[in-house]
Amino acid sequence: MPIPTGVRAAPDHVPPELVRSFSFYDDPAILADPMRALSGLHDGPRIFWNTINPRHGGSWVLTRAADIRHVTARPELFSNKGQFNMAGFIGESWDMIPGELDPPDLQKFRKLVGAWLGPPTVAAMADQIRARAADLIDEVAGLGGCEFMSAFALRFPVSIFVDLMGLPQDHAPMFLQWEHDIIHAPNMAVRAAAISAVADYLRRCLAERRRKPSGDLFSRAILSEVDGVRLSDDQILGICFMLFTGGLDTVASSMGFQFHFLAEHPEVQARLKTEPALASRFVEELLRANSVVVVHRVATADSEVGGVLIRAGDWIAIPTALGSLDPEDAQGSATVDMDRRAVRHMAFGVGPHFCLGMHLARRELVIAVEEWSRRMPGFRTSEDGEVTFKGGGVFVVDTLPLTWS
Amino acid sequence: MIVKVDRARCQGHGRCAVEAPGVYVVDAEGYCASDGLLVPASREDEARIGVEVCPERAIRLEA
């Protein structure tokens, strides 16, 4: 995500005792162990003002599941407009759809896009998703080890995104590079160039499909209507950009945390081999223990959250991990328990903006675990490298060296 | 035991129907469609699992 500005003083209405400067990007605790660092925030105030929010120049941070439910359930008071600000970063003005829409457009576009990403679509793609996973695993199986993020976790969801969009697979490495630049490039010009490159690419595809329709998602978007009106180019771009940024680093990173756990828990690997049906339970429990996304809202009016006055115009950061791991919640334990009887979490968000891609994401994550369990010997982290993490709008496993014999 | 679904809170995650399929069903858009359902005694524990997995806390059970 773009990082336009740095630290700013807290506004006057923020009580001084609630001001913190905690970088979700590069605090040493985040870089050492993001989930542990986030859990540590539960020991502080239930809501605090963070002077470090590069995207929005300072923001509130919600630490409790109850407050996260309160804010996300009230889109009229806490808007999504501009939360990603991809267009603004390159001097344009389209919204990411539906992630930057408010009611009533939100519901209309969610209904449309949700139908494209629902269980029937995912079921129809399942064999192909499994084949993509198998191909990538076959590439590394004979090597005795790999850096898991670059060899598998990043490439796998990109290949599925490319399939979903009806694009050629040999364009996948290009998307991978753009994704990396948008999220991680330290140079802002490089970031902006990558956002522009993706927007230009998607616009070119759209123009081609307008001339020559096919059966893919672009063509469905072209033929779709909201309120009886066909979608504009900017609206279709906003939808496709949302699919691109929503489904790549989030899935890759969740997979990174899950395979890091597996690498350090041979007993869980063994169990997944003998009980393959446990894969979806494993994925759900690991999503609970490692919810990687931070979402944002901007207050449209003054109101109180957790006993604190929020002023209109204030940005609010919502690390979903803090909701999933809230010790005030019955399930808030950081301990992974494969036999937890019911798993509840906020990894896909809550409220009317919860993740529309969750069915696809779950399927990709479960298939990754199933195929590695089925095709590979036991694996562990390798001494020939280091497990590293990065922070930001999504907490990611940056490198995960694995070895097997 | 009767299932009570707060339709204003339910956002259509569909977790109830996945984790407790013997009790909960969802409509075509994924929203919980089990409001008012009378739960047989043999399925009361499964009904509780549905309550526990709901990320929105939209389900409760009435005696």
Image (tube, grey):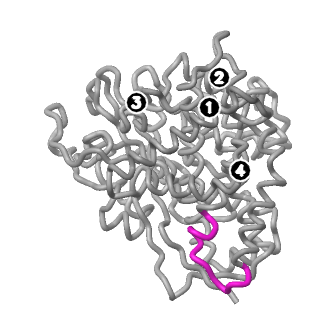
Asked whether disc 2 touches disc 4, contact meaning CB atoms under 8 Å apart, the reply is no
Q: Which residues are magenta?
A: A141-153
Q: Which residue does the numbered mark 3 point to in the structure image?
A: A92
Q: Is residue B4 visible?
A: no
Q: Dot 1 lies on which element?
A: loop
Image location (x, y in percent) of residue A86: 42, 38
Asked whether disc 1 touches disc 2, contact meaning CB atoms under 8 Å apart, the reply is yes
Report the amino acid beneath label 1. Ala
Q: Residues within 10 Å of mark 3 (few under 14, many from 20)?
A: few
> Same chain for marks 4 and 3?
yes
Foreground of the two, A201 or B19: A201
> Spatial distance from mark 2 to mark 3, Cα to Cα?
38 Å
> Spatial distance from mark 1 to mark 3, Cα to Cα?
39 Å
> Same chain for marks 2 and 3?
no
Q: Horizontally, is A309 left or right of A306 in the view?
A: left
Q: Which residue does the numbered mark 1 point to in the structure image?
A: B58
Q: Residue at x 63, y 25 (%)?
A: B6
Q: Which mark is residue B7?
A: 2
Q: Which mark is residue A168?
A: 4
Report the amino acid beneath label 2. Arg
> Same chain for marks 1 and 3?
no
Report the amino acid beneath label 4. Pro
Q: Dot 2 lies on which element?
A: loop
Foreground of the two, B5 or A262: A262
Q: Dot 3 lies on which element?
A: loop
Compared with B14, A378 (above or below) is below
